[in-house]
């Protein structure tokens, strides 16, 4: 889990944005939030990770792309 989080944190902004495209976002960034919540023992991040896996692929990917372009990080990072 920690290596996955570290890999995404160290990826270029272009790679991060590409992984936030529809259908990929739910998998890559949903797991990122879930794993980060488990590592930090943060209940909100765990719940958001689970929600993002299912809803992120369809709708929430737009939020991730906007925040990645503007800040280089996703919400609840």
Image (spheres, rainbow, N blue to C red):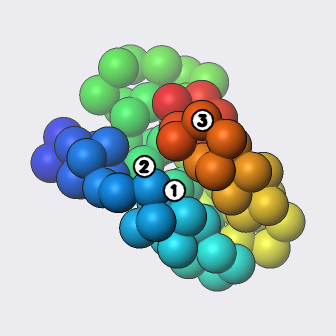
Q: Secondary structure at mark 1?
A: helix
Where does residue 64 sit, x and y in percent of width and height? 68, 52
Left or right, 13 with reference to 73 = left
Residue 51 in sight in this render: no
Task: Tell me which residue sits at (68%, 58%) in the image.
Answer: 65
What is the crowding at mark 3: few (fewer than 14 residues within 10 Å), some, or many (at least 20)? few
Q: Secondary structure at mark 3?
A: helix
Task: Tell me which residue sits at (35%, 20%) in the image.
Answer: 40
Please report contact status of discs 1 and 2: CB closer than 8 Å, yes or no. Answer: yes
Please report contact status of discs 3 and 1: CB closer than 8 Å, yes or no. Answer: no
Where does residue 45 sit, x and y in percent of width and height? 55, 30
Where does residue 6 sit, x and y in percent of width and height? 22, 43
Where does residue 49 sit, x and y in percent of width and height? 57, 46
Report how far apart the C-alphas of labels 3 and 2 lie in the structure.
Answer: 17 Å
Q: Which mark is residue 32?
A: 2
Work out whether mark 3 precedes mark 1 in sequence or the reverse, and give the earlier one: 1
Q: Is residue 58 above or below residue 66?
A: below
Work out whether mark 3 precedes mark 2 in sequence or the reverse, and give the earlier one: 2
Residue of label 3: 71
| Figure quadrant of residue 59 | bottom right
Residue of label 1: 29
What is the crowding at mark 2: few (fewer than 14 residues within 10 Å), some, or many (at least 20)? many
Task: Tell me which residue sits at (29%, 28%) in the image.
Answer: 39
Residue reaching furthest to the bottom: 23
Left or right, 49 with reference to 52 = left
| Figure quadrant of residue 36 | top left
């Amino acid at each position: 889990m920690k290596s996955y989080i570290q890999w995404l944190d160290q990826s270029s902004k272009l790679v991060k944005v590409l992984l936030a495209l529809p259908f990929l976002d739910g998998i890559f960034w949903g797991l990122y939030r879930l794993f980060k919540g488990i590592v930090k023992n943060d209940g909100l991040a765990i719940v958001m990770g689970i929600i993002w896996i299912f809803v992120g692929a369809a709708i929430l990917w737009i939020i991730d792309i906007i925040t990645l372009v503007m800040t280089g990080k996703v919400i609840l990072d």
